[in-house]
Amino acid sequence: SEHFDIGSIQVSVDNTSESFLVRLFSEKGATQIKVTGKELRQRHPKTGDKLEVDSDEEEVTSSSESTGTAARAKEMVQYHSAKPRAKLFPAKITKKGRYGYSVEWADGATIIYSMTSIATAAGGKVNNE
């Protein structure tokens, strides 16, 4: 399996297709993966875990087991969580050093996604070594 360098991830926004183009670099070259805005928005900004969105109550919980972070994530995500069918695009994206990217969504939320969460949303398995 290919190993990608998380720090070198490049992300650009494609407002027409309401998605992000994630470029991952490895010793074999570059791979470009399309991640929809909806997919990214449903990810925990730090870990990339999928957040379960229950549209009835707008209740958001993180699938991560550690309750402390899940509770904190819950507060944070609830505050940011997109209303069903909220307009997410046009979005603006800004690189935040080696940490990740800040996404300014059209519904007014600004969320900073770590490189880990972006890589996970793009289908990568993150190896923290």
Image (cartoon, rainbow, N blue to C red):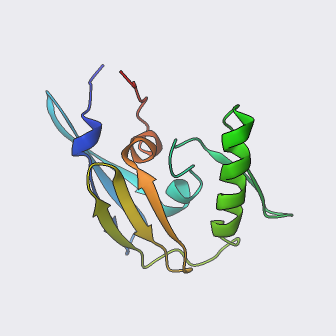
With respect to residue 82, does 2 lie above or below? above
Q: How many marks?
A: 0
Residue 55: image x %, image y %? 79, 62
The single residue placed furthest to the right in the displayed view is: 56
Residue at 70 percent of width and 70 percent of height: 84
Provide residue 114's location: percent of width, then percent of height.
41, 49
Q: Quadrant of the N terminus?
A: top left
Is residue 90 positioned above or below 54 on the image?
below
* Residue furthest to the front: 68
* Relative image position of residue 75 (x, y in whole percent): 71, 58
- Which of 13 and 70 lies nearest the eye of the viewer? 70
Residue 51 or residue 74, whichever sits in front:
74
Q: Quadrant of residue 82?
A: bottom right
Q: Position of residue 113 (x, y in %)?
A: 44, 54
Identity of the residue drawn at 37% across and 53% down: 34
Pick whichever, 59 or 88, lies toward us.
59
**Residue 105 in view in this figure:** yes
- For the point 57% across and 49% down, the residue is 44
What is the quadrant of the C terminus in the image? top left
Front position in the image: 9 or 102: 102
Res 62 seen here: no
In the image, taking residue 90 as reference, residue 69 lies left or right, namely: right
Using the rendered view, name the quadrant where residue 77 is placed: bottom right
The residue that appears at 28% across and 61% down in the rendered structure is 95
Left or right, residue 62 beside residue 58: left
